[in-house]
Amino acid sequence: MKAIFLTKTGAAKNAFEQRETPIPEPKAGEVLVKVQGFGLNFADVMARKGQYQDAPPLPSILGYDVCGFIESVGADVKHLSKGNRVAGMTRFGGYAEYAVLDARACVKINDSMNSAEATALATQYCTAYYSAAEVVNLHKGDKVLIHAAAGGVGTALVQYCKHKGCEIFGTAGSEAKLKLLKENGVHHPINYTTEQFDEQILKLTDGKGVDVIFDSIGASYFKKGIKVLAAGGRIVGFGAADMSDAGNIFVTLKRGLGFGIYHPAEFLMSSKALIGVNMLRIADNKPEVLQRCFENVIRMYNEKVFQPVTGKIFKVSEIADAHEYLEMRKSIGKIAVEW
Ligand SMILES: NC(=O)c1ccc[n+]([C@@H]2O[C@H](COP(=O)([O-])OP(=O)(O)OC[C@H]3O[C@@H](n4cnc5c(N)ncnc54)[C@H](OP(=O)(O)O)[C@@H]3O)[C@@H](O)[C@H]2O)c1
């Protein structure tokens, strides 16, 4: 089969090579999928730049999510069979013509869903659902701040918070994205590249702050977030996009220190909570939780609460362009790549 290998870290245009490699075989509890399209995730950009510690050693096949048709199933797989159209999560290996998936991380999908929608449900919506429904219990009227709210996970979080009746504060990095946030139901869109989002939050909440923050940016954004978290508030950290363009070791160090240093007593005294989310760790430790999230995501998709946004669909020959598009913050919603 053909697969896209990451052969070098660095700029997208020099990083990938298409190579022939054997088709993997599904073991018990796994399925083999003939891939129509695979999703791009911001973690892929970080892996390509050598900044993602969970990434496999080079040369490697990246890719967290695919959609396509079941080619064969391993022993003990009962709910899926050859020919089913599915979306699911891979643990790398997605940038290929065939990919092996844990059957618990794979669901049937209808024929009308495109690759970007299908793969968004697998990664971005499961991450958003786990963060907002499993680790934080949102209530009507809660004030919620979502960073990068026009991105893949951000869009999913906005849709979930809107469904729960929250007051949504959403940040994004361009006027076009802010316009979209307004259309998507964000009550307070904030351009965090031109405004100090923490000052805006305090102004908009009469100095009280917000109840929940979903932070995928990290560094100084995280520290400012803690400051505008109201008593009883929770900050969910699930990414560090601000570290991705740090450039050299000194800037990386400075931004890393920008997160701040905290003593647990500070959280106790102010009744605030910091929650870290890493879906790979959940997949390793509690695959049944991931399965539950995915089932709920599909239910909410069928109820039209979740409506994944297609950012752009590229061809495999355009893999470098697709990576650059995501890295350069041009994307809105999910990016997919098709064979
Ligand atoms: N922990 C987990 O298990 C998990 C799972 C999935 C995703 N994630 C994280 O969730 C975040 C969103 O992932 P996604 O795949 O849906 O990507 P995405 O949100 O579609 O794209 C990343 C967005 O981050 C914003 N951003 C802020 N600072 C940036 C910078 N220095 N460089 C590039 N982008 C920057 C940009 O939006 P603006 O232009 O609006 O700033 C950009 O569009 C990422 O941080 C990712 O690593 C974590």
Image: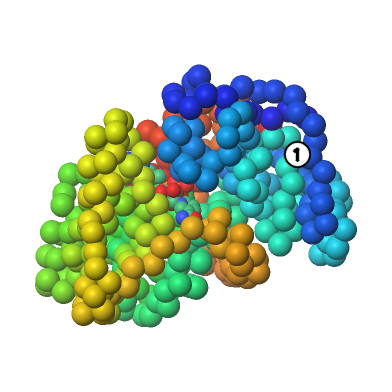
Q: Is residue 198 above or below residue 303?
A: above
Residue 175 visible (yes or no) = no
Asked where in the image residue 93 lies, by quadrant, the reply is top right
Q: Residues within 10 Å of mark 1 (few under 14, many from 20)?
A: many
Q: Please state which of residues 197 and 50 is positioned toward the viewer in this rendering.
A: 50
Write the residue at 21% across / 78% down. 270
Q: Please state which of residues 336 and 223 is positioned toward the viewer in this rendering.
A: 223
Q: What colouring does the structure picture have?
A: rainbow
Which type of secondary structure does the marked residue at label 1 adopt? Answer: strand
Query: How far from the left and from the top, in percent, is residue 29?
Result: 79, 59
Query: How far from the left and from the top, in percent, is residue 142?
Result: 31, 76
Location of the N terminus (image quadrant): top right
Write the residue at 28% across / 47% down. 256
Q: Please state which of residues 208 and 104 is positioned toward the viewer in this rendering.
A: 104
Q: Is residue 142 above or below residue 126?
A: below
Asked where in the image residue 23 lies, by quadrant, the reply is top right
Reading the image, the residue beneath label 1 is 98
The kind of residue tagged 1 is Tyr
223 vs 154, left or right, is: left
254 vs 292, left or right, is: left
Query: How far from the left and from the top, in percent, is residue 268?
Result: 26, 79
Location of the C terminus (image quadrant): top right
